[in-house]
Structures are given as structure tokens and as C-alpha cells.
Amino acid sequence: MASNYTAGFGIGQDSVINLDHGDPTMFEPFWKEVGDNATVKISGWEKMSYTSCDDGICWFLEPEFGNEVMRLHRIVNNAATDGRYIIVGVGSTQMIHATLHALASIEVRHPVNVVSAAPYYSMYPGIVDLMKSGLYHWAGDAAAFRGQDNFIELVCSPNNPDGTIRHAILGKEVGKRVHDMAYYWPQYTPMRGPADQDIMLFTLSKATGHAGTRIGLGRSAPNTFWHHCI
Ligand SMILES: Cc1ncc(COP(=O)(O)O)c(C=O)c1O
């Protein structure tokens, strides 16, 4: 889309940077400039059914929306799409809950330890323990984890808070991994080709800055795992 949008929008000497938490309102001027080209209209008679499609893995994912997400990934070239399935949740936060629940459900020993290499996204401990699930619990820094195989590693890349490119640090053959790719978009980091991890999470909060729409996206090859998510 042609645009004469320029970065630097309204940041002046008196601007305050809130380091406590991020809020993507910096994208507002861009979307204002895009105007009606990005308007989404939902008629009163639409979206009535619990199900948006009969044959998809995620019965509440609008097929058209799913297709557009895949198209965007192909254009940006940041995630493998062939043979991949998408499920949606209320933000990436709910998708983290869903994936942990699903992965821990198919483990035999509980609670499964959920770890992430420090410095990690400050909300991970709270998100993981919010449900007080008997299936999994927060177990801290992945580098300090001394268990054997009973873990799920949250791998955030580019990492919040330091922007580094991350890979799993615990054994590949054992344990499970969830790749939080919230910031793998060209406005945050150089693109390195399509990410192709088993379980990848993205979110509209960071992709387009629409945090308030609360749309999180999980991608995976089809397997029974996704059914545990839904
Ligand atoms: C790394 C990371 N993952 C997940 C989230 C949560 O995103 P959402 O707004 O989709 O719940 C955030 C939000 O800041 C984040 O920084």
C-alpha cells in the first residue's frame, strides 16, 4: 500500500517513554493515515454462530482471516505456512495458556516445569501461574533448570526485553518448546527467513499494533496437540 507515512511521529522533547509496560499506541498515526482502507465492518447479523467453519482445526477461526494471516506471513516471509495450521486466542497471552495446557496434558508427570532463559518477558511467571494449574507451573530461568526432561521451554525471539535472537537452550531431544515470535516482524528486527518451529505464537498486538483487539495466533503442523488447545 502506497503511503507517505514517516517515522518519528510526534516524538518531542517532552515525550515520556514508559518503561514499565509497552503499549503499541505509537502505531495510531500510521493507521489514521491508512484511514478507510483498513476499516473493518462487522454487520449485526454476522458472527452469530459459535463455529465459523466446519472443517478447520480451530472451529472459531474465520477462514478468511486465517487465509489473510497466512498471506501476510508469505509476504513478510517470517513464518513457514505450508502444511501449517492456525488457531486463534484472546491475545498471545491466552495462546500461551492454551499451548501450555495442551503440551502438559499429554505429559505423564505433573506439574510440568515451565522455564525461559533470563532475561525473560516479565509477565511469563504470572501468566504461567495464573491458572494455578496442576498440570504445569513456573520454574524460572531455563539456564538454572536442573531437571531432566519434564519441562516446557518458552523461547522468545526476538526476546523481550533485550531484543536478542534466541534459540532453545535445553536439550532438543527431550522436553517441549513454545516459540514466542511476537516481535519477529520487520519493524522490530531484521528478517532472517521464515521461522519453522513446531509451535509458534504471534500476536496482532505487535504485528499491527492492535493490542486491544486481543488476537493471538498459534501455528503448528497438524497433530492432536492442537485439539488440546481448543
Ligand atoms: C514476548 C511477548 N509475548 C506475549 C505478549 C502478550 O501479547 P498479547 O497482547 O497478544 O497478549 C507480549 C506483550 O507484550 C510480549 O511482549
Image: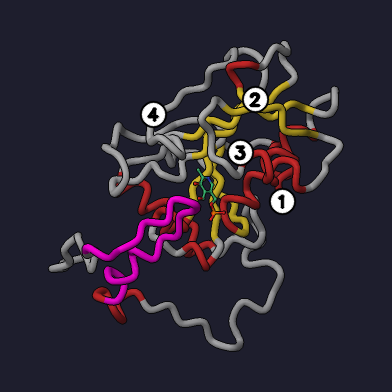
Q: Is residue 25 above or below residue 154?
A: below
- Tell me which segment is drawn in magenta: 13-32
The answer to which of marks 3 and 1 sits earlier in the sequence is 3
Which quadrant holds the N terminus?
Answer: bottom left
Query: Helix or strand or loop: what does disc 2 sit on?
Result: strand
The answer to which of marks 4 and 3 sits earlier in the sequence is 4
Q: Is mark 2 within 8 Å of ligand 1?
A: no
Residue that numbered label 1 is attached to: 230
Looking at the picture, which amino acid does disc 2 mark?
A: Lys
Residue that numbered label 2 is attached to: 176
Query: Helix or strand or loop: what does disc 3 sit on?
Result: loop
Q: CA distance from mark 1 to mark 2?
A: 19 Å
How many residues crowd around disc 2 within 10 Å: few (fewer than 14), some, or many (20 or more)?
A: many
Residue that numbered label 3 is attached to: 222
The front one of 154 and 99 is: 154
Residue displayed at 61% across by 21% down: 142
Residue that numbered label 4 is attached to: 165
Residue displayed at 43% across by 77% down: 40
Asked where in the image residue 55 lies, by quadrant, the reply is bottom right
The front one of 158 and 2 is: 158
Q: Position of residue 198 (x, y in %)?
A: 55, 31
Q: CA distance from mark 3 to mark 2?
A: 16 Å
Q: Position of residue 156 (x, y in %)?
A: 49, 34
Q: Is residue 227 above or below residue 15?
A: above
Q: CA distance from mark 3 to mark 1?
A: 13 Å
Residue displayed at 40% across by 35% down: 162
